[in-house]
Image: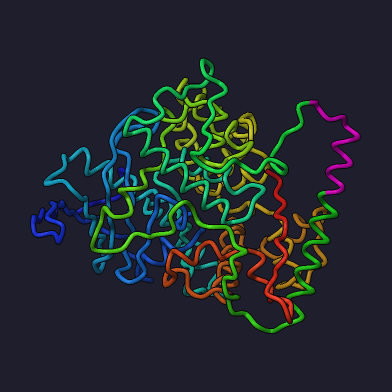
Amino acid sequence: MEDTQNQGCHRHCSEHPEGTAWFEFHIELPSESEPFQLEQAVCSHGFFMMAPNRWDPLSKTLTRPLLLHNPSSSSSSLLVSMSQRSQSLAVRVHAVHSISPQQQRHITARISRMLRLSQAEEKAVREFRRVHADHPNRSFGGRVFRSPTLFEDMVKCILLCNCQWPRTLNMAQALCELQLELQNGLHCNVVGPSNPKVEAEGFVPKTPASKENRRKKAPTKSALLKKKLELELELELEVDRNLQMDKSSDTTSLPPDNGDSEVLGSDDSCYQFPNEGQYFDRTGNFPSPIELANLSESFLAKRCRLGYRARYILELAKAIVEGKIQLEQLEELSKDASLSCYKQLGDQLKQIKGFGPFTRANVLMCLGYNHAIPWDSETVRHLKQVHSKNTTSKTIESDLEEIYGKYEPYQFLAFWSEIWDFYETRFGKMNEMHCSVYKRITASNMRSTVKGTNKRKRPSRIFQC
């Protein structure tokens, strides 16, 4: 990014424990009254827990592969680690002796996007801290972690819909594993229109179908209205049940894992220093649009257990590759997070299949808009439990405005600071958490277990996806 400066300090070393080289350079951090903290900037949103990101709580280092060129093209990745050195970030590029100035600028721009280091983002952070000074949160400094590319953000926003958090982690992990397989030449014959019924029997478990299937026959208006009312009622009843169970006990500790939680993926092992390649030998980068565009929907759904989401992700990837969706244009429109461009961006996203109100609001948050709060059943629960509001799906927008409107245009940041503090009160500091615990940060584990049994009912999560 043009407004992020980087220092010329760099070196390579051949004395790595594994005998491989690495190249290091530094990115200058913003000068502000409150010092920048890498762990605060990274561990600020659930995206940091999702593959291919790997946060090491001991060394306070973030490691992941970064795509070198245009995300809509086929290009190579480099494994990059970043850690803080006073007022700069030390960026280590693994398994290379040197990189070109262009590659260094590209990596700097990707990291700046993830950590929101641009001048516009820095200004927003300062202004938010000023208007939110009466409610400081030491764990949340105003930066919300996001992905190095808009495409990755958009896909991950789709993965948040209509499922529990462990399933979201599983799907992201599977997509990165698939990217490595595609990079190594596997599945090269798995294409869309010419081979629409590819079977991957025995490769991965079948995707659970009962909750994911879409009706082939278009529903009538009365059926849609009935379904909407049923979902609203279910949402409100679920939140009320959660609150009743919360009130039955004053414990806030994380219940022991009794095996009911979904597994994180095919392999729960996490990245551990100093063996930089240990985890990433089995998990690749997040796939680019061109890597996904030619796959068949049935294969992608089965391989990554995406269910109906596979169709939306494939259509998004194809539209980007074909030039129908211009990611650069979307990012340019949102460069200064101008409210005058908000509706235009929302209208463009609305034309993309699979991007309902909840998903659109999350994507717009990733684009730098901090005034709109994406809401779901967890938001309703939070307002009822923390603010004692009798919130329903019909009143939630007015309730959110009543509580957070005074922080305009940073309503989302105020809300997120509050809910992130609530999560850390329940589960502990996110930046100190081992990755094996991520899958247990669920709504079911936010409730105390019923006395006399370890069995917990798995709640539904209802989104306006």
Asked if residue 435 is positioned above or below residue 352 in the image, the reply reads below
Residue at (46, 65) in percent of width and height: 436
Measured as percent of width and height from the top left, residue 92 is found at: 22, 54
The answer to whether residue 104 is left or right of residue 114 is left
Say which quadrant the C terminus sits in: top right
Q: Give the range drawn in magenta.
A: 217-230
Residue at (61, 30) in percent of width and height: 352
The answer to whether residue 288 is left or right of residue 232 is left
Say which quadrant the N terminus sits in: top left
Asked if residue 85 is positioned above or below residue 192 in the image, the reply reads below
Q: Can residue 405 be seen in this view?
A: yes
The answer to whether residue 416 is left or right of residue 27 is right
Camera-side residue of 38 and 62: 62
Measured as percent of width and height from the top left, residue 205 is found at: 56, 43
Residue at (50, 48) in percent of width and height: 368
The answer to whether residue 167 is left or right of residue 464 is left
